[in-house]
Amino acid sequence: MLPSNEITAIPKLLELLDIIGCIITIDAMGCQKEIAAQIIAKNADYVLALKGNQSKLEDAVNSWFEKAQSKNFEGVDHSYHHTTESAHGRIEIRKYWSVPAEQLGELPNQEKWLGLRSVGMVMCERRLWNKTTIEVRFYISSLEHDAVVLHDAVRSHWGIENSVHWVLDMTFHEDASRIRKDNAPLNFSVLRRLSLNLLDRDKTVRGSVAMKRYRAGLDNNYLLQVIAAI
C-alpha cells in the first residue's frame, strides 16, 4: 500500500527503480502527464489506465471508440485480440483493441503526454448463470499499437493486484489497518511485504501464507528458519 497520496509517491518510487526497457503499468490514479514523462525519461514505456481523473481525455477516447465500434472498425488501423476463460460456473470474455494515437485526431492536451503512441480499449464480459455484466476500460500507452501486448500488460498488472494485494488484505488485514501517524504506515507496509515474500519463498512447509504465518507465531525455530532465508 502506497502512502495516501499516490500521485506524489509514484514519482519517488520510480526514481529508486531501474526501469530501463520495462513496461510500467499504473492504475488511473497514476495517469498523470508528469509520471508519463518521468517513465519516458528513464527509457521505459508506460500503459496507464484512463479514468475520471483525466475526464476530458477519457471522454474523447470513449467517444472515438464508440464510433469506431459502430462501424466495426472499418477503415481503422487497429490491432485486436480476445480471450475466453471459464471457471466456477463463470465465463469471462475479454476483448482488446489497440490503435495508433494519431488516428483519434487531436486529443485534449495530447502534446503534453510525452511518448504517447497508442490508445487501447479493453471490454470484459462476465457471464454468470443469472446475469451478464460488461466492463469497459481505456488505456494510453507509449508502445506501438498491439492488442496482444496490451493484453499481456493488463493481465500482468491485475495478476499482481490479485496475488499480492489480495493476500496482504486477507492474511495481514492491510485494508483494515488503523495505523496512520507519521512514517508508521509506510514502515508497516514494507514489513508486510517483506514478511509476505519470506513466507512465500519458504518451501519447507506446505500450505498457505496464512498457515505459515500462524506457524511462525507459534514456533520460534520455524520463524528463525523463515527469517534466515534473507
Image (cartoon, rainbow, N blue to C red):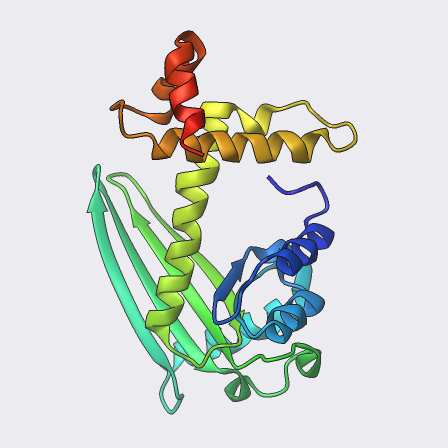
The foreground one among 130 and 102 is: 102
User: In the rendered image, which quarter contains the N terminus?
Assistant: top right
Picture quadrant where residue 61 is located: bottom right
The foreground one among 110 and 218 is: 218
Give the left or right position of residue 158, taking residue 194 as reference: left
**Residue at left offset 66%, top offset 32%:** 187
Give the left or right position of residue 135, taking residue 17 as reference: left
Question: Measured from the top left, where is residue 13 in percent x and y?
Answer: 64, 53
Q: Name above or below for residue 155 compared with residue 206.
A: below
**Residue at left offset 32%, top offset 71%:** 148
Picture quadrant where residue 40 is located: bottom right
The foreground one among 12 and 148 is: 12
Name the outermost residue toward the top. Answer: 218
**What count of labels does the image hold?**
0
Residue 52 visible in this rendered orientation of the protein: no
**Residue at left offset 67%, top offset 36%:** 186
